[in-house]
Image: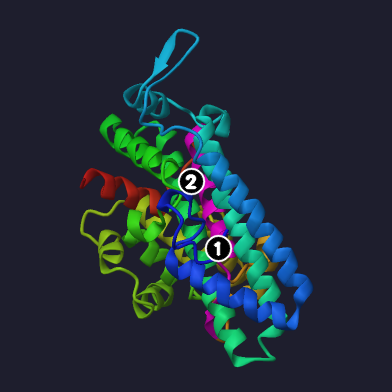
């Protein structure tokens, strides 16, 4: 399969045009300096293409399918998705959906491999540093797309979300599973902007008020609509807590623990090292301290998953704290605007 893939039907393309051009340039550059790595990456790309071809042999989820005397339609699939509790995971989803999710994960791993291959080479050539940063951007966009999909699935399992909102979420998911080429910038540009900005700031901890982190988001051109949503007059306490989780990359429980410990020890401003000792885990950075372009989108994904798991636990246990992440609150708002 051609790297550019310009003659390939859109539904069979592994990458959009910008991604195809970047991957081609990166592969050529790596082949000149590390031919073994280039061979490994070419093999991974072929495997990705094989998986993509299998997926596109499966009929669209919008078409009726009969099995065992029952016919699954678009409407019945949407109704099924709206009734899921999430406990069965991907076993609740149609085969095409699970394969599309596998493809997106495999694409992310493929791009991570490209980032890893160019990391040790970027000091040898300024062009390779530029390629490395561009590959990180493409990796980030794919991870944001996976986060968007996970977010919609999380919304479906929330008990206090209106049926009409869940139907819109289910419809959006089916659209995603039917088109591997869709990415977060086409689906929810406001969320992409928020994640793009958050991926470029390092939380200071400090007083744990979040003021400096908020203004860092502004500086990184976070979508004003995202910031406006959480600064409106009628914002709830749960939404404020969810925003604090987003700003610091911690759960409400972790933030509560740190605030109580600061008060107990008479600390006005906490350091990262101190917070790590109190929480018993190393605090991650979504970007390099000295280079906001050198992002780590996997760290942001872990932050989202940590916050989502905490929200799900509060839903099941009835404990205090936000039962939605900041992104879920915003997603409900966006879906209700459609």
- The total of numbered circles placed on residues is 2
Q: Is residue 186 above or below residue 32?
A: above
- The spot of residue 237 in percent (x, y) is 34, 52
The stretch of residues the image draws in magenta is 291-317
Q: Is residue 177 magenta?
A: no
Q: Quadrant of the N terminus?
A: bottom right
- Which residue is at the front of the view, 33 or 182? 33
- The spot of residue 60 in percent (x, y) is 41, 34
Q: Residue furthest right?
A: 36
The residue where tag 1 is placed is 2
Residue at x-position 48% and y-position 75%: 200
The picture quadrant where one finds residue 39 is bottom right
Q: Is residue 314 magenta?
A: yes
Question: Does residue 204 show up?
Answer: no
**Which tag is nearer the camera, tag 1 or tag 2?**
1
- Which residue is at the front of the view, 87 or 110? 110
Q: Quadrant of the C terminus?
A: top left
Question: Does residue 220 show up?
Answer: yes
The residue where tag 2 is placed is 150
| CA neighbours of label 2 inside 10 A, class few (<14), some (14 to 19), many (20+) | some
Q: Residue furthest top?
A: 69
- The spot of residue 137 in percent (x, y) is 50, 71
Of pointers 1 and 2, the one earlier in the residue sequence:
1
């Amino acid at each position: 399969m051609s790297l550019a893939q310009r003659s390939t039907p859109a539904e069979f393309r592994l990458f959009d045009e910008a991604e195809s051009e970047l991957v081609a340039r990166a592969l050529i550059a790596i082949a000149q300096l590390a031919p073994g790595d280039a061979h490994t990456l070419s093999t991974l790309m072929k495997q990705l293409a094989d998986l993509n071809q299998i997926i596109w042999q499966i009929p669209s989820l919008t078409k009726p399918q009969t099995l065992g005397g029952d016919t699954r339609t678009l409407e019945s699939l949407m109704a099924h998705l709206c009734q899921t509790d999430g406990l069965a995971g991907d076993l609740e989803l149609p085969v095409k959906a699970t394969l599309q999710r596998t493809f997106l994960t495999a694409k992310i791993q493929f791009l991570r491999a490209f980032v890893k291959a160019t990391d040790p080479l970027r000091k040898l050539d300024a062009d390779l540093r530029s390629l490395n940063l561009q590959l990180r951007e493409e990796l980030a966009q794919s991870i944001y797309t996976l986060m968007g999909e996970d977010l919609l699935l999380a919304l479906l399992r929330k008990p206090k979300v209106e049926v009409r909102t869940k139907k819109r979420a289910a419809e959006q998911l089916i659209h995603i599973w039917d088109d591997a080429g869709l990415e977060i910038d086409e689906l929810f540009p406001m969320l992409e902007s928020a994640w793009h900005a958050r991926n470029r700031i390092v939380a200071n901890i400090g007083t744990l008020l979040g003021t400096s982190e908020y203004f860092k988001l502004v500086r990184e051109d976070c979508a004003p609509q995202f910031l406006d949503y959480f600064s409106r007059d009628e914002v709830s306490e749960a939404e404020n807590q969810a925003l604090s989780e987003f700003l610091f990359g911690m759960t409400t429980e972790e933030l509560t623990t740190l605030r109580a410990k600061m008060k107990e020890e008479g600390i006005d401003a906490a350091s990262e090292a101190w917070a790590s000792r109190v929480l018993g885990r190393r605090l991650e950075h979504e970007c390099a301290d000295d280079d906001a372009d050198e992002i780590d989108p996997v760290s942001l994904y872990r932050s989202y998953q940590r916050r989502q798991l905490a929200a799900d636990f509060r839903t099941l246990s009835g404990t205090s704290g936000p039962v939605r992440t900041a992104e879920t609150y915003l997603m409900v708002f966006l879906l209700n605007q459609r």
